[in-house]
Image (tube, rainbow, N blue to C red):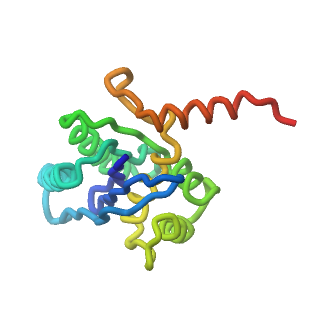
């Protein structure tokens, strides 16, 4: 499975492509940051981001797009821009019939570090370790995009959007079944 992770942001949008490998391993295909100039109006910034997201989709042809789920913040301008860019990523995927998965920041941190409260550096270190990278992925937006992709590879259950329009892969179904079974076991 190939996952395009998108860490949405109006000024800096992290993008990372990861392929799954046998044995719960993963390999980085590409990583980057799409930037938009604060000198432009918001509509033109969004247009630029949409065009670059389309280019990433067309170049890397992901099986799933994993986007960070927007959460409430005190800074309304930041959350608005983040939500707008998340929407662009979802529309780019939907136009191509690619399923979209939303993961919260704490889900992503827990998936790659084991702790939902990990800091940025911990996430960067674990992403580098998981993907076998010689250096930490930088900036943090790029590392977060890779972490989103890895998170989806490891925790796909319940994250897909679109209901019955998108079916889970056999690997996702197996993971979801195992996760469900683990939750049903009585704790001692």
Residue at image point 55% right, 47% down: 107
Residue at image point 53% right, 52% down: 24
Residue 2 pos. (x, y %) = 34, 49
The answer to which image quadrant residue 162 occupies is: top left
Q: Report the residue that reaches farthest toward the bottom.
A: 134
Q: Is residue 2 above or below residue 16?
A: above
Q: Is residue 52 above or below residue 183?
A: below
Left/right of residue 117 with respect to residue 133 in the rendered view:
right
Left/right of residue 157 with respect to residue 116 in the rendered view:
left
The answer to which image quadrant residue 39 occupies is: bottom left
Residue at image point 57% right, 68% down: 122
Closest to the observer, 33 or 25? 25
Residue 52 pos. (x, y %) = 17, 56
Whether residue 186 is visible, yes or no, is: yes
Residue 3 pos. (x, y %) = 35, 49
Residue at image point 40% right, 59% down: 146
């Amino acid at each position: 499975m190939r996952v395009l992770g998108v860490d949405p942001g109006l000024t800096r949008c992290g993008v990372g492509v990861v392929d799954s490998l046998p044995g719960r391993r993963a390999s980085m295909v590409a990583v980057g940051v799409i930037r938009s100039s604060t000198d432009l109006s918001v509509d033109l910034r969004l247009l630029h981001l949409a065009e670059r997201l389309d280019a990433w989709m067309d170049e890397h042809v992901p099986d799933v797009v994993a986007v960070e789920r927007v959460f409430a913040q005190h800074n309304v301008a930041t959350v608005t821009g983040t939500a707008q860019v998340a929407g662009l990523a979802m529309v780019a995927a939907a136009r191509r019939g690619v399923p979209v998965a939303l993961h919260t920041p704490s889900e992503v941190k827990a998936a790659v570090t084991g702790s939902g409260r990990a800091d940025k550096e911990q996430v960067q270190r674990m992403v580098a370790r998981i993907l076998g990278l010689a250096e930490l992925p930088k900036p943090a937006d790029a590392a977060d995009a890779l972490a989103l992709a890895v998170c989806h590879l490891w925790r796909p259950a319940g994250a897909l959007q679109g209901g019955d329009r998108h079916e889970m892969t056999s690997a996702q179904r197996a993971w979801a079944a195992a996760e469900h079974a683990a939750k049903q076991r009585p704790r001692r």
